[in-house]
Image (cartoon, coloured by chain):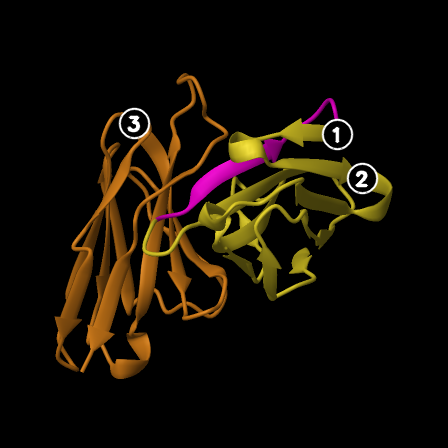
Amino acid sequence: AQSVSQHNHHVILSEAASLELGCNYSYGGTVNLFWYVQYPGQHLQLLLKYFSGDPLVKGIKGFEAEFIKSKFSFNLRKPSVQWSDTAEYFCAVRTTDSWGKLQFGAGTQVVVTP
Amino acid sequence: GAVVSQHPSWVICKSGTSVKIECRSLDFQATTMFWYRQFPKQSLMLMATSNEGSKATYEQGVEKDKFLINHASLTLSTLTVTSAHPEDSSFYICSARPSFGTSSPYEQYFGPGTRLTVT
């Protein structure tokens, strides 16, 4: 069965610092990849997704992610974070044989200090 | 567009009672809806996949007689936690996937979640 792992469970950084969150998955076939964000008290929102094509995808709020097939990775990045980026970030994978089901990573709690 | 609502947003019930949670796609039709459970500081765990007009498909380890799912229309799925116990206390989240033929059938849109506390 496939799995999704996020390397960091908790990240604390200052405003203007750069952010990179790791995500690796284990599945040999074709995948769709997602990053979701959950702000405190709010529902999950899609940050960005990768289906095919350019492996560097840009999402909302200045986030981007790079799909590296050889490394089974889909890391999320933001060059300069803001206090409002404090949230929980989830990587998710959908395989082509999963009938649309998403498998989520454990999540990374990001705290941005002023 | 693509808004999913859940009702109620939070509910407290006594042990042994049943609780129904509704998930609605407000501005699109959803042939498929998914139900997730999220424990504090943990990830979302898929409980079941709900397809309109057919029986839900449950993930391994999820008791289908305890978590009854009904997807009677293209905009509504319900999750009923039967004979709830304190260990069922959790955050339940639904998501809806637009039907094929719409603009984004490969997306999933999430509801705000329902906090269930069983006393």
For the colour yellow, the matching chain is A
Residue A44 in the magenta stretch? The answer is yes
Instruction: State left or right for residue A65 relative to residue B116.
Output: right
- Residue B85 screen position, x and y as percent: 24, 81
**Residue at the (33%, 29%) spot, across then down:** B2
> Bounds of the magenta span?
A43-54
Instruction: State left or right for residue B41 relative to residue A108.
Output: left
For chain B, the rendered hue is: orange
Residue at the disc numbered 1? A55
Residue B29, which numbered label?
3
- Chain on which label 1 sits: A
Residue A68, which numbered label?
2
Q: How many marks?
A: 3
**Amino acid type assigned to the residue bearing label 3 in the image:** Gln
Residue B104 seen anywhere in this rendered image of the structure: yes
- The residues tagged by marks 3 and 2 sit, at their Cα atoms, a distance apart of 34 Å
**Amino acid type assigned to the residue bearing label 1 in the image:** Pro
**Amino acid type assigned to the residue bearing label 2 in the image:** Ile
Mark 3 vs mark 2: give the one in front: 2
Element under disc 2:
strand
- Residue A15 screen position, x and y as percent: 57, 50
- Residue A76 screen position, x and y as percent: 66, 44
Residue A31 in the magenta stretch? The answer is no
Instruction: State left or right for residue B94 relative to residue A29.
Output: left
